[in-house]
Amino acid sequence: MRSSNPVFSRRGFSRDNGYAGFNAGPQAGAAAHGNPYANPYAGNPYAEPVNPYAQGGPDLQQGYPQAPAQTGRMTMDDVVARSAMTLGALIVAAGAAWALELPLGAGIGAAFVAFVLGMIQTFKARPTPALILSYAVFEGLFLGVISQVYNQVAQGAAMQAVLGTIAVFVGVLVAYRTKLIRVDRRFARFVTAAAIGFVLLMMVNMLFAAFGGGDGLGFRTGGLGIAVGVVGVLLGAAFLALDFKQIEDGVRYGAPREESWLAAFGLTLSLVWIYTEILRIIAILNND
């Protein structure tokens, strides 16, 4: 099974059968000692090589040009630095959109551009820092616009949503580090299924709202809207836990340093999800 976060469902961060696939030193023979994240192909003569960065890997076998050998390995400092740059670009862009009082149309346009850039990066073979930072800028413009819109409905909603997002991040991190959250294959499957159902439900609600007027099926207003928003926040928190696990595995099993950009990208996606859901909940509470 691949990672629930689409950012990591690709080379290096793929988790077929729930295992990490970097084939670094600690993996050798680790499966025999009960390590659930050991190389599942160790000792299997019929399996394809799992390290896409090693010389003579799948790219070379399939006739594609071989990528240069990776010398640097991802560290937690790399992830922190890249995440700070990505989130910093997002925050600066959001602040600029807020200060300039950009119209809602500009925010929607920025959201569309951010979506396209995010999808391009998701399906690229390698992380592109410029693409990820560009996504962060356009996503920030969108967040700045909608934050101002919601702030007119509920004064102080944006700051409350920021504090709520920080609280969720810290809470999930503490729960993950203290093993209160067990991130395994079952957890990933459940989060994946729940996220797909949630997104499909919101798409149906959007279609009903577009063709029937009002709020569609009512999933974004009243008590039902609050309940749906809480589910959205919980899903975002689950994605954060998956992000933490992917980062931990990447550092442990020797992912190339450039993959830290993907880690930053995944964290940004999860935090944006949580922020927008909390913002929506606050607006509903102030409208009731």
Image (cartoon, rainbow, N blue to C red):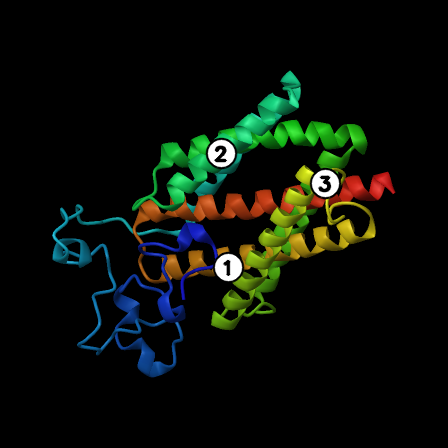
Q: Would you place residue 12 above or below residue 100 in this image?
A: below
Residue 184 appears left or right of 216:
left
Label 2, label 3: how far apart the Cα atoms are: 28 Å
Residue assigned mark 2: 114
Label 2, label 1: how far apart the Cα atoms are: 22 Å
Which residue type does callout 1 highlight?
Leu
Q: Residue at x 29, y 51 (%)?
A: 256
Residue 18 coordinates in the image, percent (x, y): 40, 69
Q: Nearer the viewer, residue 248 or 282?
A: 282
Which residue type does callout 2 highlight?
Ala
Secondary structure under tag 3 reads: helix
Residue 98 coordinates in the image, percent (x, y): 65, 23
Of badges 1 and 3, the one in the foreground is 3
Residue assigned mark 1: 242
Q: Residue at x 83, y 44 (%)?
A: 285
Is residue 217 something that shows in the picture?
A: yes
